Image: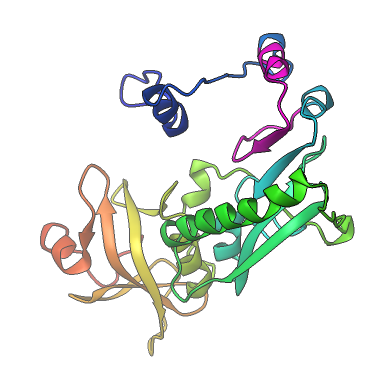
Amino acid sequence: SGRNLLSKPSAVKAWSVEHRVPVIEMGSAEDPNCFAQLKALKADLFIVISFGRILKRSFLELPKLNAINIHASLLPKYRGASPMQAAILNGEPETGVCVMRLVEALDAGAVCVTKKIAIQARETILTLEPRLAALAAEALTEALPLLEKSRVTWAEQDPTQATVCSKIRKEDGKIDWNLSADRIDRQVRAYLDWPGSYAFYHGKRLVIKKSRPVRSTVAVKPGQICGVSDEGITVGAGDGCLLLEALQLEGRSALKASEFLKGTPLKAGEAL
């Protein structure tokens, strides 16, 4: 991380080292050293969260009871790497978490506990993620006694209903102004943490930090600025307009529109 791309431990490893909790790190998917260390634990249960890999069967067979995963979607919907962002991006009314059995396939194991929450109006990834983290803790607390006493009931997923969300790339944040204002607004809220939703102004990346769809009484081309005020910068989309309420120009701090316009006086008729 950083300009010098120095190696930096994850938050989990940093906390573990500070509190003298043993850390085992995996190299390749078949890391023999990691396998040997995990086997030596003689664990009853493996709990995998946000690991980003499909574990081999040899690893999954190590614990006495099971190897489980907590996934932040209502499976079989949104298997994969970005379920929280996908739920916001696609305008889902609800989402949740599932505790599932790990198998050698992407988020395809049987489910034993499911918990749901409504996605709030104007929800962003920064508000949804901590709510789902708390819900995941509840789900895990519910599942552990059932697993320990062998009273768990597993429900197989229906593969015909499965959808997959891929890993988000930096270029996914680029705004396509031909999309509807509602869709672009959901993108801004889904990608607020990373990679950010951005356009370009005079060759510089312009990240949209806060927006909302608005109606326009004048015809405007997608990406064209049709209004500027202290409230925000109104930009045309494929359907409707988007009011940009907070922005960050490349190399500068994020600002409310009224402050941003003092240093970067965008004008109606310009294009992003």
Point out the stretch of residues depicted in magenta: 34-55
Residue extending farthest bottom = 217
The picture places residue 129, in percent across and down from the top left corner, at: 49, 55
Q: Is residue 60 left or right of residue 121?
A: right
* Residue shown at the point (54%, 71%) measured from the top left: 119
Going 77% across and 57% down the picture, which residue do you hit? Answer: 76
253 w.r.t. 215: above or below: above
In percent of width and height, residue 206 lies at 32, 53
Q: Nearer the viewer, residue 5 or 231?
A: 5
| Point 43% across, 72% down: residue | 122
Which residue is depicted at the point 74% across and 29% down? 55
Q: Is residue 43 above or below residue 237?
A: above
Locate the N terminus by quadrant. Answer: top left
Up/down of 199 relative to 183, above or below? above
Nearer to me, 80 or 188: 80
Residue placed farthest to the top in the image? 33
Q: Where's residue 17, x and y in %?
A: 41, 22
Q: Position of residue 24 (x, y in %)?
A: 57, 19
Q: Would residue 107 be visible to someone looking at this image?
A: no
- Report the quarter where the C terminus lies: bottom left
Q: Is residue 109 on the magenta stretch?
A: no
Quadrant housing residue 91: bottom right
**94 sits to left or right of 29:** left
